[in-house]
Image: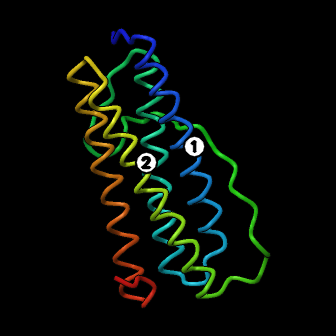
Amino acid sequence: MISLNQKETSLLQDLKKHEDLCIKKYSGYAAQASDPQLKQLFTTLGQQEQQHLSSINQILAGQLPATGGQQGGQQAQQAQAFPPIQPGSASPQTDAVMCEDLLSTEKYVSTTYNTAIFEFRDPGVRQVLNHIQKEEQEHGLGLYSYMASHGMYQA
């Protein structure tokens, strides 16, 4: 059983809100994307964010989640997607805006995990948070790679 102090609990509550927002964005944007490849990317990353939320909920419940692959049959909370910007109006331009928004979100969330990692006493929790942060960085790489290959990222 993991014992959390007030600061650790507060940090986890913040991370939980961030993960919930990521799930909503990925789900809503997957429904809006005009490119089937982008729809699939958003769907896959959204599913991984669901796993992150499940891990955070497990830690808050005093349990240490596994860090390899699927989260042992744990059910993540379902989040409602953002409503479409304008139904039926998806375009490559809209896809680019959604990618930019999600890349910025991933940068912010990764930074938030970095701060939290330094604040936790339990080495097991630190390891789980480090694993999630690494996956958030990989999400950013996936988004960047898609954007760069579709002329959406100007370096």
What residue is disc 1 on?
A: 20
Q: Along the horizontal axis of the image, is 135 left or right of 34?
A: left
Residue type, mark 2 in image = Val
| Gap in angstroms between the C-alphas marked 2 and 1 | 11 Å
Instruction: Indicate which disc, 2 or 1, sits on the residue closer to the N terminus.
Output: 1
Q: Is residue 120 above or below residue 136?
A: above
Q: Along the horizontal axis of the image, is 37 left or right of 144?
A: right
Q: Quadrant of the N terminus?
A: top left
Q: Along the horizontal axis of the image, is 79 left or right of 107?
A: right
Q: Residues within 10 Å of mark 1 (few under 14, many from 20)?
A: many
Q: Is residue 112 above or below residue 36?
A: above
| Residue lying furthest front | 155
The residue mark sitting in front, 2 or 1, is 2
Q: Is residue 102 above or below residue 10?
A: below
- Which of the 4 quarters of the picture holds residue 62? top left
Q: Residue at x 75, y 83 (%)?
A: 89
Disc on res. 66: none
Q: Residue at x 79, y 76 (%)?
A: 87
| Residue lying furthest bottom | 151
What residue is disc 2 on?
A: 109
Percent x, y of residue 127 = 22, 32
Q: Quadrant of the C terminus?
A: bottom left
Q: Residues within 10 Å of mark 2 (few under 14, many from 20)?
A: some
Q: Residue at x 25, y 18 (%)?
A: 122
Given residues 63 and 60, the one toward you in this image is: 60
Given residues 140 and 104, the one toward you in this image is: 104
Q: Residue at x 74, y 68 (%)?
A: 84
Given residues 114 and 83, the one toward you in this image is: 114
Give the SS element for disc 2: helix
Residue type, mark 1 in image = Asp
Figure coloring? rainbow
